[in-house]
Amino acid sequence: MDKSKNLNTSLPTLSVLIVNYNDAGFISETLESVVSQSYKPKEIIVIDNASTDNSAEIIQQFGKHESNIRFIKNAKNMGILYCYDQFLGVASGEYFQVIGAHDKLLPGFFEKSMKLLARYPEAGVCSTLAYLIDEKGKNKGFFVTPIVSTKECFIKPETAMSIVNKIDGYIPGHTAICKRTAFETIGGLIPEMHAAADAFALKVIVCKYGACFIPEALVCIRTFPNSYSKRISKDLNCNKEIWQTMEPLLTTTYKEYFTQGHIEYSRDMFSYIINSFTLYNLQNKEVDYIREHVPPKKILEKVLYLLIKMGIKSQKILYNLYVFKHSKRRICPVIYNRLFRSLHFHVLYFISKMRRMVV
């Protein structure tokens, strides 16, 4: 019996979700990184959201050689949150992970995560660190998140709750392997939270059940200038809806997990984001009007148009400073800490790497 069969019989079962939409350039690499893992998922469910490229054909061809790949094709693009429900309706694993169709796993990710979860079955989730890569696969460095331990461990609920309330979320969703019963107990994803839905669910899960953590980069997250999360982060109405949904939950349904200080910080941060976007949109309307109705043609007109744009950028900086100053001072130490998070991350990662080499 080979190693993978031994692992799969001794460890809990895992279902994997990959949501694909026009990712023909990356889906083969993503699937290969999943099927080549030493621990084999019980099922790899790939949902295609009505792609217009040939990615669906690539997936189907891949599935001919991998018996645990299940392909589902939607007639229209239903969005990522709908696909979560679709996936959970057919998945049968004790744990699950959601992988971007353009991301990839590094060797040992499943094995190390599932072994740690098997040691601590009370944990609601296990996460690792991650690298960032660009569209061509070039390593852009670490996805910088707080390193809560320099060795793999289980973080008890009370400790996890303290971490979440002090430094907000620390789990990159791309690296999270979640216990299905824990996910369902906290109510799953809340659609009105859009791109923040999974991050909020993970915060509640770690506070309620605790979490396993591996201080090693075992996932590569591919970054795009127009990704779903980046589009949502720039959408004023979505940010308003996220906060309008989140605020009452923090003070009612999940009030046992979040301190008053954390709620005030979240309120101030969303206030800052929403007010900044409002002012930014007002400034952009001026430039858009000029570009559409009186576009610059002559040299002098182009120079004046450039000066207008420079002036608006200067106004944006001043507006942001004003809105930031107007926000409560609790934001200041958090943003101040984030300025040094990258240095702190690399120091702790170096320590954890040295520990692994010694062992």
Image: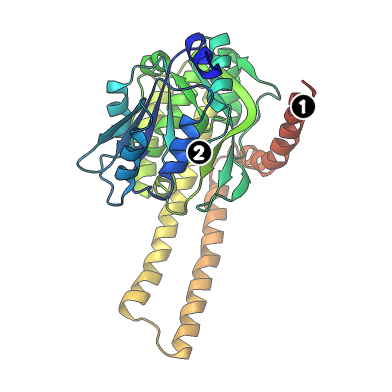
Q: Is residue 342 left or right of residue 194?
A: right
Q: Quick one: SS at disc 1?
A: helix
Residue 265 x, y percent position in the rendering = 53, 34
Q: In this view, does 86 lie to the left or right of 298?
A: left
Question: In the displayed structure, would residue 316 be above or below residue 152?
Answer: below
Assess disc 2: are there few (<14), some (14-19) or many (≥20) residues with their C-alpha within 10 Å of its C-alpha: many
Rendered position, 229 above or below 312: above
Q: What is the distance, in whole Å, between disc 1 and disc 2 at their CAs?
A: 24 Å
Spot occupied by residue 167 in the image (x, y as percentages of width and height): 60, 30
Q: Position of residue 62 (x, y in %)?
A: 37, 37
Please name the amino acid that badge 1 sits on: Met
The residue that mark 2 highlights is 104
Nearer the observer, 245 or 359 = 359
Residue 117 horizontal side relative to residue 226, left or right:
right
Q: Tell me what residue is drawn at x 62 percent, y 24 percent.
A: 214
CB under 8 Å between discs 1 and 2: no
In percent of the image, x 50 and y 35: which residue is there? 33
Name, please, the residue furthest toward the left: 75
Q: Residue 357 carries which label?
A: 1
In the rendering, which numbered label is found on residue 2? none
First of labels 1, 2 by sequence position? 2
Give the residue at x 48% y 23%.
Answer: 177
What's under tag 2, amino acid-wise?
Answer: Lys
Q: Label 2: state its secondary structure.
A: strand
Residue 257 in view in this figure: no
Left or right of residue 13: residue 106:
right
Outermost residue to the right: 358
Q: Which quarter of the figure has residue 321?
A: bottom right
